[in-house]
Image: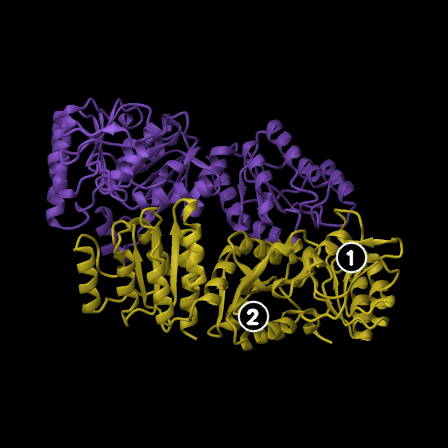
Chain colours: A yellow, B purple
Amino acid sequence: MGVTDFFDPDGIAVIGASKTPGKLGNDAMTNIRSYDGDVYPVNPGSTGSVYGYEFVDSVGETDADLALCCVPSPVVPEVLEECGEAGVGAAVIFAGGFGEVDEAGREREAEVAAIAEEYDVTVLGPNTAGYCIPHLDLYGSFVPEIRDVETGGVALVAQSGGIGVTGAFQLDREEYGVSAMFGLGNRANVDFADLVPVLDDDPHTDAIAVHVEGTDDVDDAIAAFRDAETPVVMLKAGSEELGDFVGSHTGAPIQRRETYEDALAGEGVVFVDTVTELVDAARAIASAPTPDGRNVGLVTAQAGPGILVADELRERGASFPALAEETDERVTELLQGITYTENPVDTGRPLPEFGEVIDAVARDDAVDAVVVYEIYERSLGYPVEELEALADDLDKPICFTVAGPRRFEEERLEMEAAGIPTFQAPERGASAVGALLELADE
Amino acid sequence: MGVTDFFDPDGIAVIGASKTPGKLGNDAMTNIRSYDGDVYPVNPGSTGSVYGYEFVDSVGETDADLALCCVPSPVVPEVLEECGEAGVGAAVIFAGGFGEVDEAGREREAEVAAIAEEYDVTVLGPNTAGYCIPHLDLYGSFVPEIRDVETGGVALVAQSGGIGVTGAFQLDREEYGVSAMFGLGNRANVDFADLVPVLDDDPHTDAIAVHVEGTDDVDDAIAAFRDAETPVVMLKAGSEELGDFVGSHTGAPIQRRETYEDALAGEGVVFVDTVTELVDAARAIASAPTPDGRNVGLVTAQAGPGILVADELRERGASFPALAEETDERVTELLQGITYTENPVDTGRPLPEFGEVIDAVARDDAVDAVVVYEIYERSLGYPVEELEALADDLDKPICFTVAGPRRFEEERLEMEAAGIPTFQAPERGASAVGALLELADE
């Protein structure tokens, strides 16, 4: 028993399954259909089948070892006990109405925890949107269309299921995916300290993005973040000023961001301020090599946005080293001296030589990380071939901030496929590269 | 003569027009085709026609009063003189290679300014991507596909043409548009002080988004921003640390953001930090009413993202007032007491009653601005009808932060059409609403 059960279930019971579209027990059934194994809709009040699966009256009649509990909170303790008696090893409890609400809810949550301990059931939630592992076609969530989310190198572990879902969909809308998404909710017995080590060992996970409000097991959580060899990006949410509202959410104790920052300084954990920064930093880290240092070679086809990117990078600790004489000569020759050939390099507009300029800067030994900005022009496109060759040859990150009409999408995705993270606004590229630079120090 | 000439040209000459795709003089021709008036491709080295327009040898042979100069910098003074002699009132000079480069460039720029003064030609640039006014089908720019950008209520005035183009395309990619986009470049004789008053009077412009690096006419610029009745959102770029790189761009003097902030405090100018914040704040201001105060009613279907939004709003000066007893009763009845019925209101998940909850909160007199967060669920959708009714009935901003699968797009655009600004990430909604709240104080 343990959180690994969520990764490798041998039969799944959906307790409170329903035929009625829009009901939570129907949405969960819709999502679980892609699972390649036995699915048992459990509902004593239903007969026949839903999506081709025959209803059963009780979890005891199934061979499931994972249960998705789609029942309201008052019924949860009873259902969890039935799960325990039926030998179910892991359960997801979606319902709210526990420790986050009132004293009665806290008692009910303690009851759930006691049952989970008695029967050794690993419980995700309560009060969670669930989880998904796209590369296993496993979508243990009631959120419709979460099964649209595809596979990527970022694992999202969110204290709030809503943030997990928000982040996963945000990645999906820009054609990225996740290795896993877990919403912890009230953490009856699955907390950061349980899940992060498993994701750290997961070969599909190249970066772990976490959303933390606060946890009673803060020392264990911090140890798990610190011990992870996989880089961790953290969004610490919930200021003390919002005390009541935060407490009413996942029953989380209010913890200051500094508690985490101080304990994790220099430990390979990058702190960010927004959901967009969380997913951007995590996917940059997941797809690009870690730089050896903070020396950035910036090549921009337009000076104005280049200034914004350079400003933001400098604030995040980047240096712009002088380029080698050889690089400078090559760039000057390519640009015929008409623009700014020192680092940052400004080509004035996208030129046919733009890819060669990037090549020259990227191959300079003084450069630890390459950042490119270019407004897409159809007649020139993006220098995809040159960048693919660089990504093959060099063990340093090459990040590309795109701008322009929608038409750039195809070439953007070609760059992504080559391991070149792309970003759709100047500050997004700068912030994600800033996260990569922070890892250079570790 | 004056910048109004850019809005109402009577014939346009494209000097340096070309038949060769990928050439600047060809791209400019491609963009100008939608102009409903006479277009004259000027090139003594070309014969025949381009896109159906007959080449002429010289601008003197045309009746144009606007010239798009697609020639390299050494030829610009001569070409501008020909324009002046031909009675052209306004010109766009795309070429770089002037004050931003070296002493020779500075001399050439002074020559351009002198010719412009002698012949009374209003010059946009040099060193600019140009401008566009979509509602006039007027795209005076060499940037391919700038003509994809549609009409909206935001005017973008960027010191860097690259930022203007980046912002316009960023708006376009999310289905917004601009009332106008101007890249100032080196500001030979068109500066913020010339353009902002014209846009302030423009009935198509409901918010002015400006990107400022620095200008010699700082007092005039500040006066123009201050005197504008149309709200101004400002991105001040270019830190002193990047001095050389910034100077090499538009030849701009380096000015601190504080110079502008101090002079414009309390004058209806909102300062932002990124391009995304610039366009988000401007479109929120352009489409929503100005709130009377900073009291926000926040309704969220998911607590975790709601906490992020509330945290960010509070940092930007929002208050979350207690709701009236009547509102509280209505919300409690709708939610049956299962979630957080104080403000912020958390419904736990999207419910069929979600629209009614928003209605109750929005109609509370204590609330100056309404902010909604909801992860889209197909079976429920977004409460578009309820929101449309609220937007009709109430003179307060209603802003909606969307999340979820791509499927929400249709309903997102319905909300936009009703005057409800939407945002695709928690921090984007919070930041734009923060900008609206700043205007409440003016």
Q: Which mark is residue A233?
A: none
Give the x, y percent position of residue A353: 25, 56
Secondary element under disc 1, as helix, strand or loop, is loop
Q: Is residue B427 above or below residue B142?
A: below
Which chain is disc 1 placed on?
A
* Residue B382 visible in the current orientation: yes
Q: Is residue B282 above or below residue A346?
A: above
Observer-nearest of A151 and B273: A151
Q: Residue at x 68, y 56 (%)?
A: A249
Quadrant the N terminus of chain A occupies: bottom right
Q: Counting other residues with Cα less than 10 Å from the Cα at mark 2, is it few (<14), some (14-19), or many (20 or more)?
A: some
Q: Along the horizontal axis of the image, is A352 left or right of A159?
A: left
Quadrant the C terminus of chain A occupies: bottom left
Q: Which residue is mark 2?
A: A204
Q: Is residue B34 above or below residue A256?
A: above
Q: Along the horizontal axis of the image, is A413 left or right of B53?
A: right
Q: Is label 2 or label 1 in front?
A: 2
* Residue A428 visible in the current orientation: no
Q: Along the horizontal axis of the image, is B247 left or right of B437?
A: left
Of callouts 2 and 1, the N-terminal one? 1
What distance separates the C-alpha of mark 2 from that of mark 1? 29 Å
Give the x, y percent position of residue B373: 61, 46
Q: Which residue is mark 1?
A: A70
Amino acid type at mark 2? His
Q: Residue at x 14, y 30 (%)?
A: B57
Observer-nearest of A92 and A97: A92
Give the x, y percent position of residue B269: 40, 38
Q: Along the horizontal axis of the image, is A150 left or right of A98?
A: left
Give the x, y percent position of residue A299: 30, 58
Observer-nearest of B175 and B253: B175
Which chain is disc 2 placed on?
A
Q: Counting other residues with Cα less than 10 Å from the Cα at mark 1, is it few (<14), some (14-19), or many (20 or more)?
A: many
